[in-house]
Amino acid sequence: MKRKRVVILGSTGSIGVNTLKVIERYPEKFEVLGLTAYNNIKLLEKQVKRFSPKYIAVNEDGFKYFKKQGSIAQKNILNVFQDLEHLVALKEADIVVIAMRGSAALMPFLSAVTSGKTVATANKEALVIAGNIILKEAKKFNARVIPVDSEQSAIFQCLEGRTNNHVNKIHLTASGGTLLRVSKSRFDQITVKEILNHPRWKMGQKITVDSATLMNKGFEIIEAIKLFDLSVDQIHVVIHPEAIIHSMVEFDDGSVIAQLGVTDMRLPIQYALTYPQRMDTGCAPLKFAQLKKLTFEEPDFKKFPALSLSIHVAKEDGTLPSVLNAADEVAVDAYLNQEIALTQIYKITEKVVLKHKNKKNPDLNAILAADAWAREEVRKEIYN
Ligand code: MG
């Protein structure tokens, strides 16, 4: 069988690194066609040595570096800010893994689906802000979108790639993040370093903060609605601190199918790459007797208002998800730079969301305009 040629957008982040581990395990099935990175040129160079991609996309410094270094033909050293849409649309590419974060993934994501590729996405921003457009185009161009995010992958696995026929409800699990057992009055005394020390998952800084405030779960509600064509009322968030069940689907007859596994991203990544086939991942199997018990609780909406805000945004849809995503991103950045307190992230985001004049059924321009507007509004709140 011909090897699948894979492009990884954001190969030096945690999802990118784990994707390469999966590929390394199955050299007879996959080959790396393209790798892209914004900053971590050192790690990218190691990856280039190991996987010999034909293309890379880097910033200007990276271009100079690799041009001098000479391992990639100069014409195949692309610009990470301009050429991703071109890279993912290449005829040679079979699978595009979107491992980069942020709304910068939107245009390459669209380009990959309109080129009919299989897209394995860990990026939730693009789906949150423009999921309707992306999935409509995917259908039109016969592209397959397979989620890599552990919860969405779980739902996808429970549905076995089918649509939402006979689905009553999705139980979207949340491990609860760093603040689950911290009282709200102490939120602003917690250091950034403590917040970043997530008990279950090793992830990037932005998503770890979003996990602590449950904004990440809010984004996942919106993401699931788009991916699986559900209504807001069909999504139930349940706190499950052990993070063994990655989500569950409840069908019309009351039967529930859950997906369980160790907390290792190689599992959902590999499933997205090999779907519908299942193969050994090298991850340790679950040992139920050692786990002893799995626990569940309702989320505390008072303590984590980001959850209610995102449900409101999910209901209204239109350009509001774009505003929520952009506002949160700028506010979390300011928090990580220690310019605002943790609870300010929510307060500022809520203010900007409520101020926005929502536009229903937006086109791409309206979505991007809402994104730019929200960023500016948050900056005014923080820096004026
Ligand atoms: Mg997740």
Image (tube, rainbow, N blue to C red):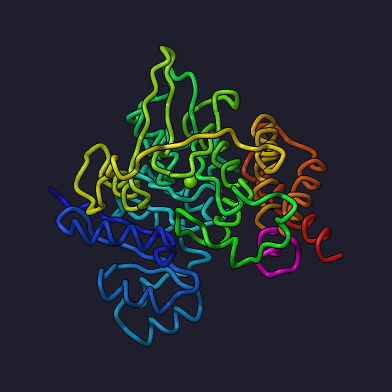
Using the image, determine if residue 10 lies above or below residue 237. Answer: below
- Position of 161 relative to 264 (above/below): above
Return the x and y of residue 377 as percentages of the image width and height: 80, 55
- Residue at (14, 56) in percent of width and height: 28
User: x, y (%) of residue 132?
Assistant: 55, 35
Q: Which residues are magenta?
A: 330-341
Question: For residue 53: magenta?
Answer: no
Can you name the residue that lies furthest to the top here? 253
Residue 185 spot, x, y in % from top left: 75, 52
The residue sitting at 41% across, 42% down in the picture is 147
* Quarter of the rendering containing residue 231: top right
Residue 249, compared with residue 168, is above or below; it is below
- Give the number of marks: 0
Which residue is pictured at 65% across the width and 32% down the height?
Answer: 361
User: Which residue of the protein is positioned furthest toward the left in this rendering?
Assistant: 1
- Between 43 and 197, the residue placed more toward the observer is 197
Q: Quadrant of the C terminus?
A: bottom right
Direction right: furthest residue = 384
Left/right of residue 48 with respect to residue 129 in the rendered view? left
Which residue shows up at 34% across the image and 86% down it?
69
What is the x, y in percent for residue 117? 35, 45
Q: Is residue 339 magenta?
A: yes
Above or below, 175 relative to 237: below
